[in-house]
Amino acid sequence: MKVKNWKALLYFLKVVCPMSWRAVVCSFCSSALKAAAPMVTLVLSSRLLASLTVRASVERILLDILALLLFGTAAGVLQALLNSRFKIRMDELKDNFTLYVGKRLMKMQYGRLESPEVQDLRQQALLPILRWGNFEFVFQEFVPAFIGGVITAAATIVLLAEYKLWLVFPILLTVTIHLFLSQIQNERFQKVAMTVGKVERKLDYYDSVTNDFTLGKDIRLFRIDKILMNKIRELNDKEVGAFAGLFYSAAVLDFWETLLVQVQIYFVYAIAAVDLIWKTISIDVFFRFTGLFINFGNSLFQFMNALVNLYSRSRFLEKFVEFDEIPVETDTGRECRGEAQPVEFSHVSFGYEKGKEILTDVSFSIPAGKAVALVGENGSGKTTIAKLLSGFLTPTAGQVYIGGAPLFAASRSSLSAVYQDFQLFAFTVRENVETDYAGRGDMWECLDSVGLKEIVGSLPEKEETYLYKSFETGGTEFSYGQGQKLATARSLYKNAGIILLDEPTSAFDAKAEYEIFRDFRRLIDGKTALLISHRLWSCRFCDEILVLSGGRIAERGSHEELMGIEDGIYRKMFLAQAQYYEDSAEA
């Protein structure tokens, strides 16, 4: 057995146990009582049998019966109490662990979170813990088996010192054989589980698709349900096939385990029966010794089973250690700098894969309080620059500076943004706008700036109305365009010194887009702004325009300067959209 597996287990316990020390205490107390009760009952029963055999006084027999009944009742009541408390504390422990994992995922460096390798690692790390019952096994199976084995072994050695203690060795031999067989089975399970982990991640995705009502129209219109069902069926067949051979080998192992246990029992009974026949022991001693031996053998089997199982599960926990060691961002708190700050990209390059750069040696600066537009064809690297400025990605070369200092996670408190793939939550309108920055601005003024004041004011609960109907039947369903406006209001409300607008009007109609950019200067007044847009008409409000092409800045200058470049990229793009801009302005 490898040492690193046990280190992974100890690491897991170090993380988990402080989450609910009451669960740990309840598990140990319940396990100790569960292990000790049969031993005490066996001794008391043997004592009663001895009293009956020698025809002791009625008072002695009644006292033995009373002791047996009182202990059984007290042990049963206490065990039931501990079990009920343990279930509550186990729920608390699992809830706290789920919160711990959720917090780490929300704090994990964004670039790593996007990686398929990290997503597979997350599945392999958490699936055995959250779905395969690692919590329950450790505290409900291994701990009882461990404590039971220790207590039973100690009691056996003490109580059998006067009898044939050498009988322990044949029992240890059968347990060793069983341990060897169990190890083989767990090696097989380990290989199957690694395969199933990746299958489960895909199944989780397809399951989320089938349950996502927002995808219902596309699924029905394009008959995607057949593709989904085929993919799910294929993965299910793969999973079932992987487990089929494993379950067969497990059945074979169970047969040999049962046979070994029976051989052990028959052997102990045969030895004790011979002594009873030769009258070297009495009937009560026969009863007590055979009970102790069999209990010892069963406890040892259970302990070895749990030990091997724990070793196997600890190998899964290596993935948890690897997952838990992925760097996370430090908590930036609620501090937010509202004053404008300069932004600089200095010789920045970035690529998700080595040798496949999206950006190459990009350098530009935005003076404090100025607005710069970033334009380019799809795939030119605009959104990558947005993620780099947000601190979600780290340059593979070069540096991003905020206020003259290298950008790090805490710098995000000085940045507000409307992303192209913005997200709203099933919270109230107010919570979606204010988020964790309540008190930093005037929510109604921000809603008015984006044309949502009247709409929100007409809702049944006004700003306390929930978005969507996921949890509240009275929730409101905003259109995509209204949702983008709300995301813009959220960005304005944060009142950060730097504002990033990544296609902020992609869902707006022509009139709404014209009104937003007509007031663009007022909305970003005193802020440092980076506008990423396909709508080149909107860039005319910026101090400078950067044109990306092939991951590099190909052109830069004001609208008039770029239009003066005869064969310029910007000029060609602008003229191609000119008729659209004219229609939008007239509207």
Image: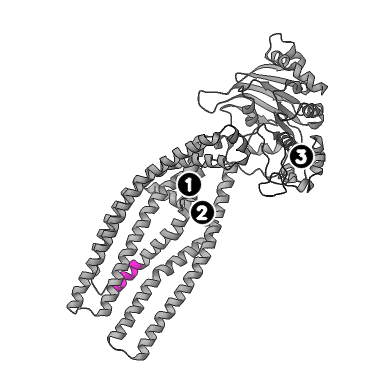
Q: Would you identify the image quadrant in which residue 285 lies? A: bottom left
Q: Gap in Å between the C-alphas at discs 2 and 3?
A: 39 Å
Drawn side of residue 42 relative to residue 235, left or right: left
Q: Nearer the viewer, mark 2 or mark 1?
A: 1
Q: Nearer the viewer, residue 188 or 242?
A: 242
Q: Amino acid at mark 3?
A: Tyr
> Of all residues shown, which one is farthest toward the top?
566
Q: Amino acid at mark 2?
A: Val
Q: How many numbered marks appear?
A: 3
The span picked out in magenta is 152-161
Quadrant of the rendering where the C terminus is positioned: top right
Residue 353: assigned label: none
In the rendered image, the vertical position of residue 70 relative to residue 482, given as above or below:
below
Earlier residue among tags 3 and 1 = 1
Residue 16: assigned label: 2
Within 10 angstroms of label 1, few (less than 14), some, or many (20 or more) residues?
A: many
Q: Which residue is mark 1?
A: 127
Q: Nearer the viewer, mark 3 or mark 1?
A: 1
Q: Would you identify the image quadrant in which residue 267 lies? A: bottom left
Residue 1 visible at all: no
Within 10 angstroms of label 2, few (less than 14), some, or many (20 or more) residues?
A: some
Earlier residue among tags 2 and 1 = 2
Q: Which residue is mark 3?
A: 493
Q: Amino acid at mark 1?
A: Leu
Q: Would you identify the image quadrant in which residue 573 lies? A: top right
Drawn side of residue 259 relative to residue 96, left or right: left
Earlier residue among tags 2 and 3 = 2
> Of all residues shown, which one is farthest toward the left?
278
Within 10 angstroms of label 3, few (less than 14), some, or many (20 or more) residues?
A: many
Drawn side of residue 507 relative to residue 94, left or right: right
Instruction: Identify which residue is drawn at 26% across, 59% down.
Output: 259
